[in-house]
Image (cartoon, rainbow, N blue to C red):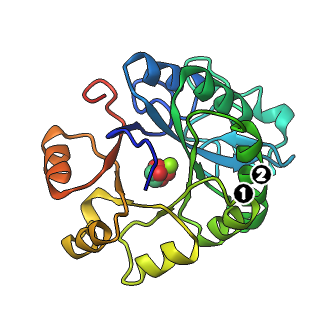
Amino acid sequence: MSLPLPRWIAHRGGGSLAPENTLAGIRLAARLGYRAVEFDVMLSADGTPILIHDETLERTTDGAGRVCDTPDAVLFALDAGDGERIPRFAEAAALCRELGLLANVEIKPATGHEVATAEVVAGLTADLWRGAEVQPLLSSFSLEALAVARDRAPAIPRGVLFEAPPADWLAQLRRLQAVSLHCDADLLRDEVLAEARAHDIPVLCYTVNAPEQAKTLFARGVSALFTDRLDLFA
Ligand code: G3P
Ligand code: MG
């Protein structure tokens, strides 16, 4: 497939050197030489797509409660670490375009909001990257969300996220017309890699923070790795 996939992808925006899923993190990744960045996108109570990983606010912000129950006026006043705000998806997209970064946009629906989240994120992705030289890659653990993305924005490439790829992973990719397989680095079996290689499907693994593990995975034929250790890889 023809994605211009770098070997290293900065995980959750800026990994662990900057507050996760923030514009500061994305800027740092670019400054350190990364050419690709992954971030998680969820809807606020107002239906605004924002960068955040957890369904609740406590771990990464000074707020409390569920993201999908929190209105924008509250969300955008929160501190997401080091005085950073929670970014809107549109802001992150503009920054990635400005910096020439490939964006892996992970659709991260709050439970029960799979269809709405995918509708908004996929539609907006097509709009925000219209005419861009470097196209984004959508991904999700939610197969339901990926099916919506396929129908809503068929031209935007999709990757399917698994923890351990199930026996029918290839059939799932085909059904979703997806171009890449994303999985947990510790749960990738050789049979899966061989099948992916036979079908020319890139395999991307999360989350790899140890150089030895990275070396082994690349030697096994993995195409790209997500890392939090922006200081170690680029
Ligand atoms: O997209 C790769 C990785 O981000 C998936 O796991 O939980 O960090 O979103 P998580
Ligand atoms: Mg993610």
| Residue drawn at 47 percent across, 62 percent down | 161
Relative horizontal placement of residue 91, taking residue 47 as reference (left or right): left
* 19 versus 140 height, above or below: above
Q: Which kind of residue does numbered mark 2 sit on?
A: Gly
Q: Are marks 1 and 2 in contact (CB under 8 Å)?
A: yes
Q: Where residue 199 sits in the image (x, y, percent)?
A: 34, 70
Q: Earlier in the sequence, mark 1 or mark 2?
A: 2
Residue 163 on image: x %, y %: 39, 66
Q: Give the vertical position of 126 relative to 184 (above or below).
A: above
Residue plotted at (72% across, 57% down)? 153
Q: Which residue is mark 2?
A: 123
- Position of 4 with respect to 72 (left or right) is left
List the residue tagged with mark 1.
Answer: 153
Q: Nearer the viewer, residue 103 or 232?
A: 103
Q: Secondary structure at mark 1?
A: loop
Residue 52, picture quadrant: top right
